[in-house]
Image (spheres, helix red, strand yellow):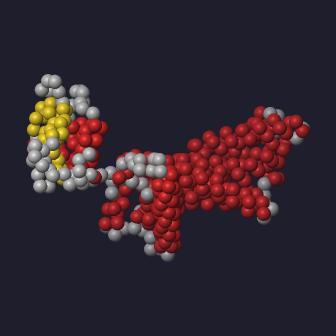
Amino acid sequence: MTDSTPSADLIAPSAPSADGVGHVLKFRGDWTLETPRPKVAQLIAEIERLAAGSSLTLDTLEVTRYDSSLTALILRLIRTSESRQLKIDHTSRTDPSIHNMMELALGVPINKDAERTHECEHDFFCTVGKATLDLYSYIIDTMSFIGETVLSLGRFVTGRARFRSRDFWITLQSCGAEALPIVTLISFLVGTILAFVGKAQLDTFGASIYVADLVAIAMVREMGCLMTGIIMSGRTGAAFAAQIGSMKVTQEIDALRTFGFRPFDYLVLPRMIAMILMMPLLTIYSNIVGITGGMLVSWASGIPPLLYFNSTVELLDITTASLGVIKSFFFGIVIAGAGCLRGMQSGNSSSAVGTAATRAVVTAITAIIVIDSFFAVVFTILDI
């Protein structure tokens, strides 16, 4: 072993003292990533075998070179010693530069979001209990969010809610005009797919003209609002969660509260109103584009566009055409609500913001499917 070889030796006290203390963990050599080092797991195991109440002194005076890997190791040893109730001294025999690095590391609070816990890996009851507590916390957070949102809407109706009109118009533009390209593409393709599939089946019975009815009914009742809702969940709902989550990371929401502003009035309310206004309009637009796509496919298959148009107009009445629009109003509420809720629940790290955006999309799409199923049952009962 050369002088630069890294080593860490746990030295027991030469004579037991009254409080049973005196262990010294002595580091020597070069503690860098390029040099092979002792097994950290073995070192941790030796420390964990010390009796609670024992003291441990970290000695780094003979360290010749080091990088951040040594400070990370010492920080881990300190955390382990504290969890084992050891009296650890990491200052009296520490190199001054390492001491400064440790003071800096210990001054940063532990990021709970970054911690990985494995306490419930093999315990069924622990897993069930943790899932139950998470579900309870989720229900409480959701109910609190709904209550705050209703109060904010109440303040808006009575003229007491305040938010910047410029933010609202920007959000309205993002939810409406900027979403038109992707809504156009998806709706057109859905209309053409319905026409292709429907015509292939109807040709068997010599009823090709009814492809217009098939496309029109499918678009205005289901596909128009459903596809628009899914598109807006992935596009705008995730953006809402990421925007609000980023504001939590930069403590802008705390700053709003400090200055006496209500974050729900400033952040949730304009996004909720913009989405509720834009979803029905986007759904109507999606229906028109989808029917146009079906018309183009039928035209290419030999059905005159005027015949297709007349068949569609004769089929659709106000009641049928408004079913998807009614559902889109509720889709807008859940998309904006899921995005803002997940943003408000976001942690204070970049990875937490990404998680919040993902959860917003999953929550919104799940809610859309549930609401659509509910309306399908209601419309069937009402014979609409």
In the rendered view, tell whether residue 221 sits above or below residue 265: above
The picture places residue 288, in percent across and down from the top left corner, at 69, 48
Residue 194 found in image quarter: top right
Tell me which residue sits at (83%, 38%) in the image. 201
Asked whether 47 or 75 is in front, the reply is 47
Can see residue 131?
no
Which quadrant does the N terminus fall into? Answer: top left
Q: Position of residue 124 (x, y in %)?
A: 51, 52
Position in image of residue 341 (x %, y %): 48, 59
- The count of marks equals 0
Quarter of the rendering containing residue 206: top right
Expressed as whole percent of the image width and height from the top left, the position of residue 262 reads 40, 67
Q: Residue at x 19, y 35 (%)?
A: 8
Whether 348 is drawn above or below 36: the answer is below
For image coordinates 10% across by 43% down, the residue present is: 14
Quadrant holding the C terminus: bottom right
**Residue furthest to the right:** 206
> In screen coordinates, is 367 left or right of 154?
right
User: For the point 48% across and 60% down, which residue is it?
Assistant: 133
Q: Residue furthest bottom?
A: 158
Q: Is residue 165 left or right of residue 76?
A: right
Q: Residue furthest top?
A: 2
Q: Is residue 69 visible?
A: yes
Residue projecting furthest to the front:
15
Please name whichever residue, 88 or 138, is drawn nearer the observer in this view of the structure.
Answer: 88
